[in-house]
Amino acid sequence: LLGFLSLQRHANAIDGQSFKASDEDIERLYNDPMCERTRGTETGIDWDSVRLEFDVAPFPTNMPLVKELMDRLEQPGGFDREAQVCPSGIISVLFYFVKFLIERDDPILGAAKIYFSILDDYSSMMHPSLLDQSGWLVKDRRINSVRDNLLSKLRAKQLDQNTTTPKVPRIYVYTDSDVSGIKKLTQGVSFCGKGQWGMEVHIHDWLMVSPHRTLDPAEADLFFVPAYSICMFEAGLIPIPELDKLYTDVVRELPYFKLNSGRDHVFTFGSGLSANVFRSWKSVIPDAIFLTPETWLFNDVATSEPCFSTWKDIAIPGYLHRSEIISLMERAKPLSKREHFAVFLGR
């Protein structure tokens, strides 16, 4: 993992919300997504040739090339240097390497978690449409699939090591096998997992492997409905009117929602719009539990009352990137030396 620390600087710099991409990064992503400018290079990796080889030798026959490239990338400065010329190539190599670690006969899940976190950092800078429209075989849906596979195997390993029943409160997490519309509400996982809104993604991920998760809805105390709604809107993936209809259709199809009028169902809303990103929330999910970092009116919305109810909802922190957490910890004084205490997160 020699390259892990060195790659953090560049990966952090292209986190679209916590950090801003440079003009050069943006130009490269839009104008040379297939990395054809590296063709015939003698000073780095010829990513154009790599892409063509991946086209003719798909996984797992491409693993000798993937391992060779990983060896080169993990040399000091390797990830940083190549990310400056071909982020799509790095995403593809990391994707295949993580897939190999997960799907081998004896999965190496500890390493898979580490390398997926690196893959997640790089793919988070790519709008899902950029991945889907590029000439590389690795698309947003394939990264989401590997993420789901990793979480599933981590959950299975946890169950093997712990045969006790789920911890209280027992939480049932809806998936697209319960309601197909959930798949559309949870696309672009890496991209949506950064910035304040990222709490919607990370709570979902945590619950998928949580000791509180139950696979038996009959024993559930709570039901979690995953959705990355504000990211769907802000990223231009789903406009507000369509989002409203999709949410409404999903709720109507939730098989256990009507049992308690939705009072035991949990939704996350990670932006200043809070539940107003779902315009019909007052009529469709008025009694459901909201997890949100915003408890008052923030964005310009056509209402004079906040969505947050102190009787049922829970205020939680927005997502912070690991580099932001480290930076805060490095600068934090001991409580005994603080005369005033305040926290601000914003722009």
Image (cartoon, helix red, strand yellow):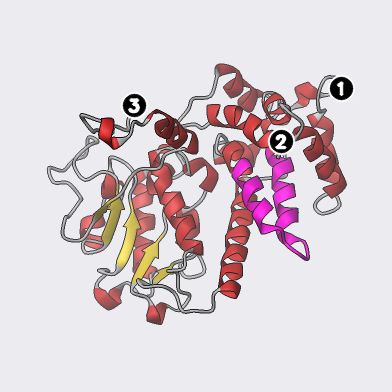
Q: CA distance from mark 1 to mark 2?
A: 27 Å
Q: Quadrant of residue 233?
A: top left
Please, what is the three-letter code of the amino acid marked with disc 2?
A: Leu
Q: Which mark is residue 347?
A: 3
Residue 3 picture location, percent across and down: 70, 34
Circle 3: element type: loop
Residue 40 is marked as 1
Q: Is residue 194 above or below residue 347?
A: below
Q: Is residue 105 magenta?
A: yes
Q: Is residue 28 above or below residue 96?
A: above
Q: Residue at x 79, y 23 (%)?
A: 38
| Tag 1 near tag 3, CB within 8 Å | no
- Reply above or below: 304 against 28: below
When the figure is inspected, residue 260 is found, relative to residue 251, above or below; the finding is below
Query: Mark 1 or mark 3: which comes first in sequence?
Result: 1
Q: Position of residue 324 (x, y in %)?
A: 44, 33
C-alpha gap between disc 1 and disc 3: 43 Å
Label 2: which residue? 2
- The residue lying toward the viewer, choosing from 178 and 83, is 83
